[in-house]
Image: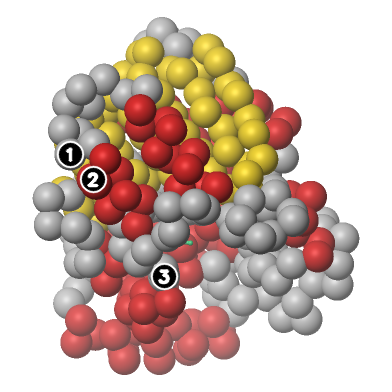
């Protein structure tokens, strides 16, 4: 076994043993919760990718998907998940199964991700205005880019920028505009060198991450000191009245300030509408400037 692999796996198993991170929100929301928790596919995929990396191998190929779904059901029925660290083969089988179950969920559901956004949408306006502040030739990362609908808009106005999109759904990456570099990866460990980018964008992806704090730290790590970060996600004030998955983390202004504050000098939040005719400003935007490297 690789040095440190067991420790890494132990960390992964510890996360598994916290059901609130996988299936429930850690803070109660003001509505009746789902009767049964369902697994957060993003979280499962993040965990399985971390475990695969810890062991220095990639999960097996697509032929094993059906096996993976069956194995996962079987392992769940044995209810060995929390104690499984003592049984390494079972743990690896579980994580491999989880990987393929989550990948299959994304493959099935990727068509639902929107591939376009109207230019009047408040989120699109915010992204375009933010892009105007970026220097010529800037390197921009869109973390959790989906099919790249914002990257597409950025391209039309700022073809000088070097664009990279990261997502854990390969089906989404396959549909990125041709000049965008797609990287397969997840928010807890972005496939980016420290300070690689001048600007980092993250729209409606943080809400799915297993650990939003760690994911935000990764956004900050990927941008150079003095570089710019823009996060857009849903405003927690509306969550109780909306349909959302039980694990989704919606945010408040204070959340964004706390998440970005440790690494950033300035954090500015605003509320925007997603449709011009919609009265409520469902989305919160947070713009921040990365502080000095050691902050
Ligand atoms: C609601 S879609 C938003 C996509 C895109 N940002 C947009 O607004 O069109 C959420 C995206 O985040 C990706 N995602 C969710 N959790 C992720 C994670 N932990 N790491 C990387 N991508 C993630 C999903 O695969 C999906 O493409």
Q: Is residue 67 left or right of residue 239?
A: left
Please name whichever residue, 164 or 20, is drawn nearer the observer in this view of the structure: 164
Relative side of 277 to 181, left or right: right
Q: Dot 1 lies on which element? A: loop
Name, please, the residue furthest toward the left. Answer: 179
**Callout 3 crowding tier (Cα within 10 Å): few <14, some 14–19, many ≥20:** few
Name the secondary structure under disc 2: helix
Q: Which class describes the residues within 10 Å of circle 2: few (<14), some (14-19), or many (20+)?
A: some
Asked if labels 1 and 3 touch by Cβ distance under 8 angstroms, the answer is: no
CA distance separating discs 3 and 2? 19 Å
Q: Are marks 1 and 2 in contact (CB under 8 Å)?
A: yes
The location of residue 93, given as percent across then percent down, is 35, 74
Q: Tell me what residue is drawn at x 53 percent, y 57 percent.
A: 208
Tell which of 43 and 149 is nearer to you: 149
Residue at (31% x, 56% y) in the render: 148
Give the mark, 3 or 2, whose residue is nearer the N terminus: 3
Mark 2, residue position: 155
Q: Residue 17 placed where, x, y %?
A: 60, 59
Q: Could you tell which of marks 3 and 1 lies nearer the N-terminus?
A: 3
Please name the residue shown 54% across and 67% down the image.
Answer: 40
Find disc 1 in the rendering and name its residue. Answer: 159
User: Is ligand 1 within 8 Å of the beta carbon of the residue shown at mark 3?
Assistant: yes
Total of numbered circles in the picture?
Answer: 3
Residue beneath the point at 81% across and 62% down: 240
Residue 21 figure quarter: bottom right
Q: Which residue is mark 3?
A: 113
Rounded to the nearest whole Å, what is the CA distance between mark 1 and mark 2?
5 Å
Residue 207 or residue 27, whichever sits in front: 207
Task: Give x and y (percent) for residue 78.
Answer: 56, 84
């Amino acid at each position: 076994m690789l040095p440190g692999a067991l420790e890494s796996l132990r960390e992964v198993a510890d996360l598994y043993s916290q059901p609130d991170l996988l299936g429930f929100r850690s803070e109660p929301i003001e509505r009746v919760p789902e009767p049964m928790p369902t697994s957060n596919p993003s979280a499962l995929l993040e965990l399985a990718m971390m475990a695969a990396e810890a062991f220095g191998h990639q999960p097996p190929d697509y032929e094993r998907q059906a096996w993976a779904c069956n194995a996962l059901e079987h392992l769940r029925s044995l209810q060995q998940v929390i104690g499984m660290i003592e049984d390494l083969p079972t743990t690896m089988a579980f994580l491999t199964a989880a990987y393929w179950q989550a990948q299959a969920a994304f493959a099935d559901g990727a068509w639902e991700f929107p591939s376009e956004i109207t230019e009047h949408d408040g989120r699109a306006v915010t992204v375009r205005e933010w892009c105007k502040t970026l220097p010529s030739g800037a390197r921009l990362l869109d973390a959790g880019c989906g099919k790249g609908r914002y990257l597409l808009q950025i391209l039309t106005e700022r073809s000088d920028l070097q664009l990279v999109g990261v997502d854990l759904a390969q089906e989404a990456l396959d549909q990125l505009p041709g000049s965008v570099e797609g990287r397969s990866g997840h928010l807890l460990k972005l496939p980016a060198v420290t300070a690689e980018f001048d600007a980092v964008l993250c729209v409606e992806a943080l809400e799915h991450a297993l650990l939003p704090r760690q994911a935000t730290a990764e956004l900050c790590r990927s941008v150079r000191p003095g570089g710019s970060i823009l996060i857009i996600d849903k405003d927690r004030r509306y969550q109780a009245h909306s349909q959302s998955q039980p694990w989704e983390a919606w945010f408040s202004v204070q959340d964004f300030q706390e998440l970005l504050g440790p690494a950033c000098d300035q954090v500015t939040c605003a509320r925007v509408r997603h449709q011009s005719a919609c009265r409520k400003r469902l989305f919160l935007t947070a713009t921040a400037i990365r502080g000095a490297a050691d902050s």
